[in-house]
Amino acid sequence: EVQLLESGGGLVQPGESLRLSCAASGFTFSSYGMGWVRQAPGKGLEWVSAISGSGASTFYTDSVKGRFTISRDNPKNMLNLQMNSLRAEDTAKYYCAKESGFMEPFHYWGQGILVTVSS
Amino acid sequence: EVVLTQSPATLSLSPGERATLSCRASHSVSSYLAWYQQKPGQAPRLLIYGASNRATGIPARFSGSGSGTDFSLTISSLEPEDFGVYYCQQRSSGWTFGQGTKVEIK
């Protein structure tokens, strides 16, 4: 059974940093692309970042380029999102999600972790 | 960037009725279009991928159609558990979500 468990969320002030992690199990982690999707309170889904199975290719939405870094530790089955220079508009629930193949959508999702950026 | 526009924003229907949701892409996404369902407090759940393929465990009352720029999700007969917000997502050029259609009980 595929399981994705996010951790690392919390309350931070504008300009501070936070690192999200996602522990994956139930599948061969290194074989699949992974991503982060966020949802601001009361709003829709927004894709944030994605990474290939090997970790060699990374992708970001424009609003987080230069501030967020996605990475993965395949031996440890961990996906990470380093978030720097956080802004109020980054406040959202962040979901870790697994693709099921090249150019496939996100077939599996974690339950999400809340990030609040506020002074 | 591919922009996905969903309509209507809200659909008010009764159990047993047929629901038809639309998703229009600003550029062709071929068949790289998926649909998700999200209920309050829950993570999204994949319903349809490749425009018309049901994901594992999804009931047959859910069907997807379309290609290129115009897509639809049909729920043939609404069950009480089907009410929630539905999102389309393209995977042809990067990743983009539509703004969602809320299906509410009339």
Image (tube, coloured by chain):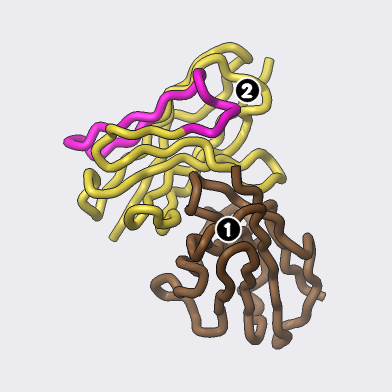
Chain colours: A yellow, B brown
The residue depicted at 50 percent of the width and 17 percent of the height is A84
User: Residue A117 — which label?
Assistant: 2
For the residue pair A95 and B55, the one nearer the viewer reads as B55
Residue B48 lies, with reference to residue A1, above or below; the image says: below
Q: Which quarter of the figure is the C terminus of chain A placed in?
A: top right
Answer with left or right where residue B83 lies relative to residue B28.
Answer: right
Q: Residues within 10 Å of mark 2 (few under 14, many from 20)?
A: many
Label 2's element? strand
Q: Is residue A75 magenta?
A: yes
Label 1's element? loop
Q: Which quarter of the figure is the N terminus of chain A placed in?
A: bottom left
Q: Position of residue B91 (x, y in %)?
A: 48, 53
Q: Is residue B10 magenta?
A: no
Q: Position of residue B22 (x, y in %)?
A: 69, 68
Tell me which chain the residue with mark 2 is part of.
A
Q: Position of residue A42 (x, y in %)?
A: 71, 45
Answer with left or right where residue A119 lies relative to residue B55.
Answer: right
Answer with left or right where residue B85 lies relative to residue B89.
Answer: right
Q: Which residues are the magenta region?
A: A60-80
For the residue pair A31 and B11, the one nearer the viewer reads as A31
- What residue did someone put label 1 on? B28
Q: Are marks 2 and 1 in contact (CB under 8 Å)?
A: no
The residue depicted at 70 percent of the width and 87 percent of the height is B16
Residue B14 lies, with reference to residue A70, above or below; the image says: below
